[in-house]
Each structure stands twice: as C-alpha cells, then as structure tokens.
Image: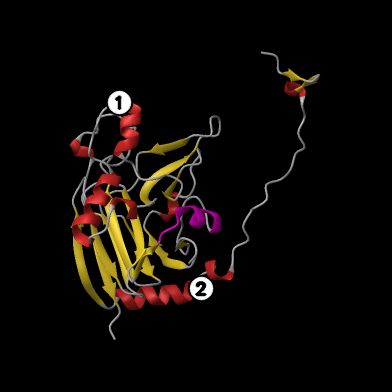
C-alpha cells in the first residue's frame, strides 16, 4: 500500500524538534519536608513494634496502620519483589492511584516521594522515607527500582500469553488476602507499587522490561502512613523477576517478605 494519500508522502514528512516539558508542576502537597519526615521516622523507630508478619512466598497478606505509623518491608531470606496495594482504612473507596503518583513524582519512586489516592480524593496516603537500595539510581538501560508503571501480574494475562488456565499471580494472591482477611472482593484490588522490582522502558521498542532484582537478604524500604491505612502485599510468584511472565518459575527463586509496623510512643 502506498504511503501517499491525496498526493502527500508521509514518509518524507518532517517534524519540529522540541525539548521535553515536564507536564505536571509539582504541587506543594507533593513536596516533603525532609527534616519533618526524618523526625517522624526517628520517633517511630524509637517507639514500639506493634506488628510483625511474614508474607509467605507466592502469597499475600494484609495489615492496618494508623496515621504516623512507619512500615518497614524487608527482603527476609533472598531476592524478592513485592506488589503492594493501599486503601484508606476508614473508606476503602479511596485507594492508591499509581498513575497520578507517577505523574506527580516519577515512574520509579524515591525517598521522600509520596503515594497518592484516587479521584476525587487525591491526597497523600503514605510517604517513602528510607531505602537501602537508593544508590542503585537509574542504570545504563534506564532501569530503576520501585516502579509505578507496571501492573500486578495476573492469571488473565497469563492465559492470554500461554493459553493455559492458572491460579498463581500477585492479583490472585491479593484477591485471596482481601477476601479472606478483610471481606472485600476482587474489584477492590488495583494497580500496585512494585517494590524491589527493577524495571524500565526499552529505548528501541518502547516496551516495559524487567531485570533481576538487585535486592538481597537484609535490604528494606520504609514508608510512613499519612492517613489510617489498610495495606496488602504480595510476595510475587515471579520471585526476583529474572524470568518473563508465561515461563515456569522455579520455587527456589521465590522468597517471603517481612513486614514490621512501628508506632511512636505517646
């Protein structure tokens, strides 16, 4: 088929060159006082550990937090990524909005970035305050950690790729956890914060890519609740994400994640 239409050759078309423009000016609510949140972190860590739980490999668990609580998620045994959902504990219609978080901060969250709730609420749910992997930065392929560009892995897409039925994904694990532990439903599960996951967009084909997570035993992240929160975390059945979705994942590349919640002494 000819590339010309009505006498115009679109293959020879020239486009004006422009420098990139950041689309969203960061609002004041997205700018965190480092001193304030460092102080909140210090006071919480000097307080009490009010909850500790292990998210088993290939499973998910939920927990709640009060405003001001600090949560630490630790790579407990070996390299492992996690998919995390957030809801307002007092109104679960208000939930994490990964797309708006990406627009207001970045495709990969860094310390002092915030996690934002959905419309019509649009307010900070939590603030990222510590990361043992912060020095990873952005690698030579554009890969970085803790993204809000990818969705949770799910069995519907697995079937689309392989033609096979399966129950064994972050989506199904999160659904099981919120149904059994909180009386919620599948529609309550939403797009996630991918913690410890190394991802990016290829420069040549513009496709989402993953690399094996650089997280090792003992690495952790911390965030502080900016409202009363319900949180769910899946220890991803892709393990360290060294194997593409649709391929068999050996059990030995999957590990649990440890969750601790700290609360300031009154």
Quadrant for the N terminus, please.
Answer: top right
CA separation in Å, label 1 and label 2: 50 Å
Q: From this viewpoint, is residue 114 visible?
A: yes
Q: From this viewpoint, is residue 80 visible?
A: no
| Image location of residue 88, percent across then percent down | 36, 67
Identity of the residue drawn at 40% across and 45% down: 151
Q: Residue furthest top?
A: 1
**Image position of 173 with respect to 63: above or below:** above
Instruction: Tell me, yes or no, whether the highlighted magenta stretch contains residue 96.
Output: yes
Identity of the residue drawn at 19% across and 61% down: 53
Q: Badge 2 local density, few (<14 within 10 Å), some, or many (20+)?
A: few
Identity of the residue drawn at 24% across and 60% down: 62
Q: Is residue 56 left or right of residue 106?
A: left
Quadrant for the C terminus, please.
Answer: bottom left
* Closer to the camera in the image, 88 or 45: 88
Identity of the residue drawn at 77% across and 26% down: 13
**Which residue does the numbered mark 1 point to in the structure image?**
163
Q: Answer with the quarter of the image where residue 128 lies.
A: bottom left
Q: Answer with the quarter of the image where residue 18 lies.
A: top right
Q: Which residues are drawn in magenta? A: 95-104
Q: Are marks 1 and 2 in contact (CB under 8 Å)?
A: no
| Image location of residue 156, percent across then percent down | 32, 36
Along the polypeptide, which appears first: circle 1 or circle 2? 2
* Closer to the camera in the image, 54 or 7: 7
Provide the secondary structure element on which disc 1 rests. Answer: loop
Instruction: Tell me, yes or no, whether the highlighted magenta stretch contains residue 256.
Output: no
Residue 33: assigned label: 2
Provide the secondary structure element on which disc 2 rests. Answer: loop
């Amino acid at each position: 088929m000819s590339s010309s239409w009505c006498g115009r050759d679109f293959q020879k078309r020239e486009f004006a060159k422009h420098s990139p423009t950041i689309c969203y000016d960061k609002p004041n609510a997205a700018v965190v006082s480092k001193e304030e949140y460092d102080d909140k972190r210090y006071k919480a860590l000097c307080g009490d550990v009010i909850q500790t739980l292990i998210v088993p490999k290939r499973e998910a668990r939920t927990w709640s937090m009060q405003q001001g609580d600090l949560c630490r998620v630790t790579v407990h045994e070996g390299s492992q990524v996690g998919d995390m959902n957030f809801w307002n504990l007092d109104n679960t219609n208000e939930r994490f909005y990964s797309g708006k978080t990406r627009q207001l901060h970045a495709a990969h969250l860094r310390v002092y970035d915030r996690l934002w709730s959905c419309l019509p609420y649009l307010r900070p749910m939590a603030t990222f305050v510590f990361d043992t992997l912060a020095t990873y930065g952005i690698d030579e392929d554009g890969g970085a950690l803790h993204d809000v560009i990818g969705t949770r892995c799910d069995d519907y897409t697995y079937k689309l790729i392989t033609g096979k039925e399966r129950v064994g994904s972050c989506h199904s694990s999160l659904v099981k956890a919120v149904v059994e532990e909180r009386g919620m439903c599948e529609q309550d599960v939403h797009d996630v914060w991918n913690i410890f996951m190394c991802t990016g967009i290829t420069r040549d084909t513009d496709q989402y890519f993953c690399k094996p997570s650089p997280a090792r035993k003992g690495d952790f992240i911390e965030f502080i609740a900016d409202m009363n929160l319900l949180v769910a975390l899946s220890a991803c059945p892709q393990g360290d994400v060294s194997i593409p979705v649709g391929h068999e994942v050996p059990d030995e590349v999957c590990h649990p994640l440890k969750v601790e919640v700290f609360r300031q002494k009154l």
